[in-house]
Amino acid sequence: MATKLLSFVVVLLVSISQTESDSTANLVESACELAVDRKYCQSVLYKNPQSLLAGPQNITQIAFQMSIGETQMVSSFILTQLMNADQSQAVDDCRKLNDLTMDYLTKALSILTESYLDWIKATDIQSYLSAALTNQVTCLDGLTEANLNLCLVSFTDYISRASQSVSNCLALINKFWIEEMDFQQSSVRNRRLLSHAHHVGRVDHDLLPFDGGFPSWMSRGDRRLLMQTAKGVKLTGNVVTVAKDGSGDYTNITAAINAAADMSENRLVIYVTAGVYKECVNVPLNKDNIMLIGDGIDATVITGSKSVSDGWTTFSSATLATFGKGFIARDLTIENRAGPGKQQAVALLVASDLSAFYRCSIKGYQDTLYAHSLRQFYRECNVYGTIDFIFGNAAVIFQQCNLVARRPLDHQQNVYIAQGRTDPNQNTGTSIHNCKVIAATDLVPFIDSIPTYLGRPWKEYSRTVYLESYIGSLIQPVGWLEWSGSFALSTLYYGEYNNQGPGADTSQRVTWPGYHLMKLSDAQKFTITSFLSGSSWLPTTSVPYWGSLLSK
């Protein structure tokens, strides 16, 4: 009898052990279900003993801590091995980008460890992780661009591991929070849409007196600042003036930004009076809530001429680069004068979360506007360029903007957008809504001889859509251009919905697996109120979410 009892206990313990083992394996496999490299994700989690007993939140925290550790190793390698590199600009870019990544990962982990994780917080984490991964890709791109030959293999190994680690974190966040909450949020939105059924037929313009057409994350005070004209108006609040003639608080923009309080929760308005400001301006990560107001397009001009041809990296060539959260610019021009023969030359680089640009002109040729990362909005802006002149991996929407292709060098072609999404779990992409896609006067005589395209896939999961926009005759009938052979043609997402104009005919468009003639339900996913909803910058307002599309 005792022998039988002992045998039963042994079998029971083995069964329990097997069940726990299966449960652990199922959790890890489930956690890595959305990972780009599932086997790598699983192997990393299995190596950490704490993962074996962790629930969804704890196992995700473990992945974050591992990612931070990998990023710290990159920092150590830069400090100890690469500080004397001949191509120091690319290395310096990597250092800055890695610092940004550490900041984003730390913020994301801090949110994750809070007792309650709602939809807004989950999408904030997703945005920070998307930006962190973009930073690491940008570092590698810069090293390649600079042809670095010092410890390159080992350094890129460090960066690659750090990137894979962030990618794992993205997969876990999407699996355990975004997917489930997205379903719940969709149900809430559908109920809200039904509750606003009596408003059917109204479009954005009917709502302009209330919200000015701006995203609802903006405070009423910021909206008022954006709607008024700076010239001749006395601005109230925390305001400083930049004037070249010495009549203001500062004579250059950089000095005004440097004097701003660090990490301020209060808006600082920097009024830049009319004039040409020949300076490259940087708004660092610690300068939050900076707002630049000019006296109008081509009246207040910030201008530079850095380019890759002159030894700068694409990332470091910007005339204006902004990283501090909540940056806003209005009524001014930002340009890079390097010209069409100088290769990549950025006018504006934006890696500022919750940033907005209103009535600005952004001028350049190749790589004019680097919408690098995080969440961005452009309203009634003019963007000029030639090759890939809007590029990057932000979650960005252009609304009521003029996107203007210029004449490139002979034997070159124009491409509007080169979107750089590298991971299917990133919440990034470029949405062109109610804009004009047109040719500059210098290009018009050459439309038949200079091919122009809506976009091409810079990275594997490139995502770009054109919604309710005017597309001019300059666009080739196929619409879109390959990057290199069949690269990304099945993994990208390119779409067009209800566009007008001679270039909007889709009968001869590309037949790639990733190209879509969008339905209404597809288009709604890329409007201001859907593509960026659920995050901390789009709280509920009285504006119906469907109001973002002009047609029904």
Image: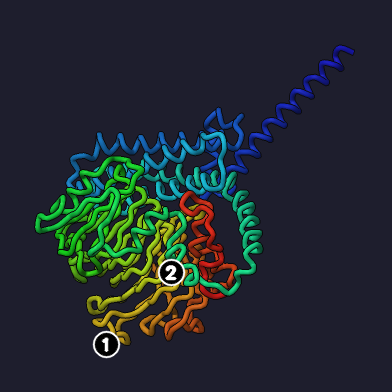
User: In this image, 249 relative to 427: left or right?
Assistant: left
Asked where in the image residue 26 lies, by quadrant, the reply is top right
User: In this image, 549 relative to 263: left or right?
Assistant: right
For mark 1, does the 10 Å Cα neighbourhood hold few (<14), some (14 to 19), or many (20 or more) residues? few
How many marks are shown on the rendered structure? 2
Residue at horizontal 24%, vertical 44%?
Answer: 260
> Circle 1 — which element?
helix
Query: In front here: 492 or 364?
Result: 364
User: In this image, 529 relative to 245: left or right?
Assistant: right
Residue at horizontal 62%, vertical 49%?
Answer: 180
Report the colour scheme. rainbow
Q: What's the amino acid at mark 2?
A: Ile
> In the picture shown, does residue 457 fall above or below 180?
below
User: In this image, 232 relative to 6: left or right?
Assistant: left
Marks 1, 2: nearer the viewer:
2
Q: Which residue is mark 2?
A: 432
Asked where in the image residue 303 lies, by quadrant, the reply is bottom left
Query: In front here: 539 or 337?
Result: 539
Residue at horizontal 28%, vertical 85%?
Answer: 444
Residue 309 in sight here: no
Q: Give residue 172's position: percent from left, percent from top.
A: 55, 44
Q: Which residue is mark 1?
A: 445
> Circle 2 — which element?
strand
Q: Earlier in the sequence, mark 1 or mark 2?
A: 2
